[in-house]
Amino acid sequence: NAGVTQTPKFRVLKTGQSMTLLCAQDMNHEYMYWYRQDPGMGLRLIHYSVGEGTTAKGEVPDGYNVSRLKKQNFLLGLESAAPSQTSVYFCASSRGTAQETQYFGPGTRLLVL
Amino acid sequence: SQQGEEDPQALSIQEGENATMNCSYKTSINNLQWYRQNSGRGLVHLILIRSNEREKHSGRLRVTLDTSKKSSSLLITASRAADTASYFCATEGGYALNFGKGTSLLVTP
């Protein structure tokens, strides 16, 4: 099992460009999450999904959109990238609610110039 | 919002020593989890302790939970250089987890 995978690993964008980050999990988990990690800030939840076809906003959703068309995939989109979105993005999945263990991907490092 | 807060922010010890890091949180919980993050990698789950448990062990890890003080501690015994990482506590926040800012542990040979 690959667990949770993320593509790409690293990307440089210019301000105003768009991109999609892909997260895939092969553990048949219902819940999936997108976090961003910035120095000194810990992890902050962007969006999450409690099942195929569902999405919900987290703590810092502005400037991002998500889709969960298939149970195994959770996409994070940036429609018009801003320098403030420079960060490391982590995807995670879990079998159930926040009382379950979360399994993290390796991260995507994004630099917006 | 980040409910858990780790202390200290950074810790430097020598191999063989024990490392203790603490987590304080604000509201009642059903469980608390600890995660490790090696530099440039994703978080890895270490241990989950439920609100009705006071102590839990996993290998060289010992976690305690004091719900009356709303605090938890993670003890790593006989530290190794490979334990160098950031350690995060996480508490429930609705459907997701709230992570603290982490303790950065450096273990020198």
Image: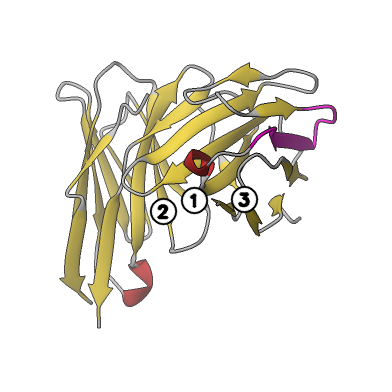
**Residue at the farthest bottom position:** B109
Please tell me whether residue A93 is drawn above or below residue B25 in the rendered image.
Answer: below
Q: What amino acid is at disc 2?
A: Arg
Q: Along the line of sight, which residue is nearer the eye, A47 or B89?
A: A47
CA–CA distance in space, label 2 to label 3: 13 Å
Residue at the (35%, 45%) spot, across then down: B88
Q: Nearest the camera: B105 or B31?
A: B105
Residue at image mark 1? B43
In the rendered view of the protein, which quadrant contains the N terminus of chain B?
top left
Subunit bearing disc 3: A
Amino acid at the residue labelled 1: Leu
Q: Which residue is mark 3?
A: A105
Camera sees residue B88: yes
Check whether the beta carbons of the residues at disc 1 and disc 2 lie within 8 A of each other.
yes
Question: Could you say where residue A87 lies in the image, as x and y percent from the top left?
Answer: 50, 47
Mark 1 crowdedness (10 Å alpha carbons): few <14, some 14-19, many ≥20: many
- Residue A77 lies in the magenta stretch: yes
Q: Secondary structure at mark 2?
A: strand
Residue A28's image quarter?
Answer: top right
Whether B105 is drawn above or below B2: the answer is: below
Mark 2 is surrounded, within 10 Å at the Cα level, by few (under 14), some (14 to 19) or many (20 or more) other residues, namely: many
Q: Chain of mark 2?
A: B
- Front: mark 2 or 3: 3
In the rendered structure, the answer to whether residue B12 lies left or right of residue A10 reads left
Tag 1–tag 3 contact (CB < 8 Å): no
Q: Is residue B49 above or below residue A111?
A: above
Magenta segment boundaries in residue numbering? A68-80
Which residue, given by chain and number where applicable, does mark 2 sit on? Answer: B36
View extreme (right): residue:
A70
